[in-house]
Amino acid sequence: MSTFDQELDARGLNCPLPILRAKKAITALDAGKVLKIIATDPGSVKDFEAFCKQTGNELLASNQAGGAFEFLIRKH
Amino acid sequence: MAKRLKAAERRASILAVAKVLFADRGFHGVSVDEIARRLGVSPAVLYRHFDSKEALYEAALSEIACQRESYVEAALGGPGDFGSVLLRMTRVYAASVARDPDYLRMEMHSVLEGAPAAQQFFESRWKSFTDFIEVSLGELAPQGRVARVDARSASLMFQGMVREALYAKCILKSPRHKDIGLDDLIEQLIQLFLAAVGYQHS
């Protein structure tokens, strides 16, 4: 997976907690910086697609690895 | 003879009929043969789209369940504090049930039919709420922003409260609550819930 500036561990959390935490984390980042999120909720794949669509941030990557889901989001 | 339909149209027509029958009589009260008969096709046509009656039930459930995108929109569309997010998400859920009360009827049947079906509803519908409530109360209590209440009991209280309101407004059309709209009722109940857990808005 590519480089990132901050990591958010959302394992064990279900919607809406991962997206609320991601919103808070990304708000603190400067534009262009990348947030990595690790989640275990299978619904998080759709959730982060919707998150980026609604917040205007860019979903750089969405991968599944070892029972967890990893997302890279670049702040717009 | 049934008109020939495209695969997507056929799938949609199967789900529409199945949903009404499952809502009316529950999972065990409906057979694949009966759904096929209502559609004017053979059971083999149904099995081309769904592997089993269980798969058909699950698909009917997903079809009418509130879409996750709506929850993401509700979670992000306003202030991010616990009380505001809970209110917006509950409103979205209540509105989705009001649009299609068959979902609620299927849930009522699932409770009678036993643990696996009821668990499926809990996982697909209520767990987002109960997890959100339990985790949030656990985080807010040390900050003094909620009372030290048992979070699991509080989430059960929320579930019972909302479900009863939905029964009253969407299924029973209870005259006791005829003077208040569902959305306003939900707002009042959420305010009561937040007061009960001693929620202090930051």
Image: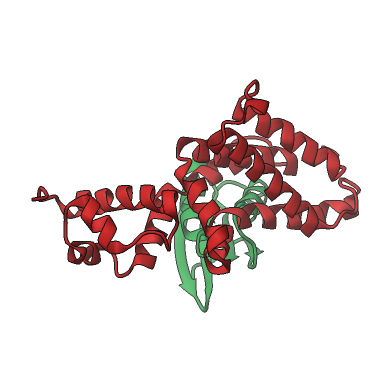
Name which residue lies at 56% across and 53% down. B125
Residue B70 x/y as whole percent:
50, 43
Residue B130 x/y as whole percent:
68, 55
Left or right: residue B83 versus residue B61 is: right
Colour mode of the rendering: by chain
The quadrant in which the C terminus of chain B is found is top right
The quarter holding residue B169 reads: top right
The picture's colour for chain B is red
Residue A35 vs residue B93, the one in the foreground: B93
The quarter holding residue B88 reads: top right
Residue B184 x/y as whole percent:
66, 27
Name which residue lies at 73% across and 36% down. B189
> Which residue of the protein is positioned furthest toward the top in this rendering?
B179
Residue B164 at least partly seen: yes
Name which residue lies at 56% across and 59% down. B112
Name which residue lies at 36% across and 59% down. B30
Residue B9 vs residue B115, the one in the foreground: B115
Residue A12 x/y as whole percent:
64, 67
The picture's colour for chain A is green
Residue B202 at least partly seen: no
The quarter holding residue B60 reads: bottom left
> Which residue of the protein is positioned furthest toward the bottom in this rendering?
A66
Q: How many marks?
A: 0
Left or right: residue A63 versus residue B144 is: left
Q: Is residue B110 above or below residue B193?
A: below
Left or right: residue A51 versus residue B38 is: right
